[in-house]
Amino acid sequence: MQRPACSPYNREGVPRLPRRITVYDTTLRDGEQMAGVSFTPARKLCIARLLDGIGVPQIEAGFPAVSADELRAVRAVSRAGLEAEVLCLSRLRREDIEAAQAAEADAVLLFIATSPLHLRYKLRMSESQVLEAIPEALDLARSMGLRASFTPEDSTRTRLPFLRKALRTAVAAGAWRVGLADTLGCINPQGIRHLVRRLRPLTGTPFTLHLHNDFGLALANALAGLEEGADAVATTVAGFGERSGNVPLEQLVSALKFLYGKDIGIRTGGLTPLAATVSRLARVPLPANAPLVGEGVFTHKAGIHIAGVLREPSTYEPVPPGAVGNRRRFVLGKQSGRAAVRALLSAGGRLPSESEVERLLRSAKRQNGRERTRAV
């Protein structure tokens, strides 16, 4: 039986991760903010059931205040009898919090921007006004029977002293979880480590990270933050989301399991079917080279590689394809060798003769760029 065969150096010098790490998936909210993506209520419910089915513990189902249809869609997910907690987004406004209550979510994710840019140009508020609004919103949510978390939007461009005040204010007002949002995906892992190291000890609550991927660092930032003590991360399936997207669910869960030895209870065997279904429902093609879940990720083309995989799969596969619900495929083309041809012919259920192997190999090398791919 093929076993994962990742680097033996992965755990050298790595700090101990939190005992409990929570993934809360925001495909239905931030994923839907991707240009061209709009989920019907039925599709939202379908995706929520799939997320629940692989063990995602918290699902951010939407932003109820944006429309009556969105409120109904979140309510449908809330009433679906899922094992997962259903979360929804809300500004620090009464009408938003009332919409969250009407949507029957288990908890509300409160946010307000805190960076100088957003305060000046978007909100036209002072820092002191924001500090007054945070406890008012948390008190209101609690009075409506809602658990509430708080995250400062654009945290990574906010002054550190103000971040401290905002998070302390939220904790004092009863927030059950607080954290950071890299809204523009513009911080690096060193910066995330710096912020989590300085803010996490102040809170005494679960500490979450909401990270965007504008520089391709969302996953690296998530892992860096977890190594410093953050214990919750927002993800989306296949990294779908606004602009460059978010932390990909399948990459974070698999990295924790196979690179860190941290199984967080999400069934990785369902990740590829989940990504394929969300891609279809979102009408966004899943790249063939999407890490772990793309159709080409366990597809071998070079003859040397195929020969190695046939002898011992872990020569060119760090994890078994089935561990993430994917399949192994071989490509027949000009780079193929006899081992690939023999394996592809044998996949049909019969043992090919050497003359057949030679004939097909010569044909493949004359195809001028045309290739054939087959699951094996």
Image (cartoon, rainbow, N blue to C red):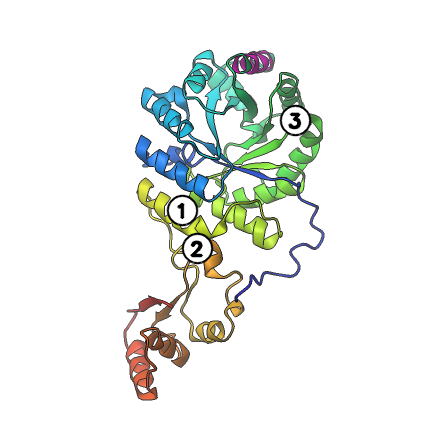
Q: Secondary structure at mark 2?
A: loop
Amino acid type at mark 2:
Gly
Tell which of 160 and 353 is nearer to you: 353
> Label 1, on which residue?
274
Left or right side of 39 for 30: right
What span is in magenta? 129-141
**How far from the left and from the top, in percent, is residue 17?**
66, 44
Q: Is residue 261 above or below residue 235?
A: below
Q: Main secondary structure of the magenta part?
A: helix
Say whether disc 3 or disc 2 marks the residue closer to the N-terminus. 3
> In this rendering, which labeled residue sits more in front, label 3 or label 2?
2
Mark 3, secondary structure of its residue: helix
Q: Amino acid at mark 1?
A: Leu
Q: Are marks 2 and 1 in contact (CB under 8 Å)?
A: yes
Camera-near label (3 vs 1) is 1
Q: Which residue is mark 3?
A: 160
The residues tagged by marks 3 and 2 sit, at their Cα atoms, a distance apart of 42 Å
From the viewer's perspective, tell me whether residue 73 is left or right of residue 114: left
At label 3, the amino acid type is: Leu
Magenta highlight on residue 264 = no
Q: Which mark is residue 325?
A: 2
Measuring from the top left, give residue 80's x and y in whole percent: 39, 31
Q: Is residue 45 above or below residue 360?
A: above
- Disc 3 crowd, CA 10 A, few/some/many (<14, 14-19, 20+): some
- Residue drawn 37% across the image and 27% down it: 76
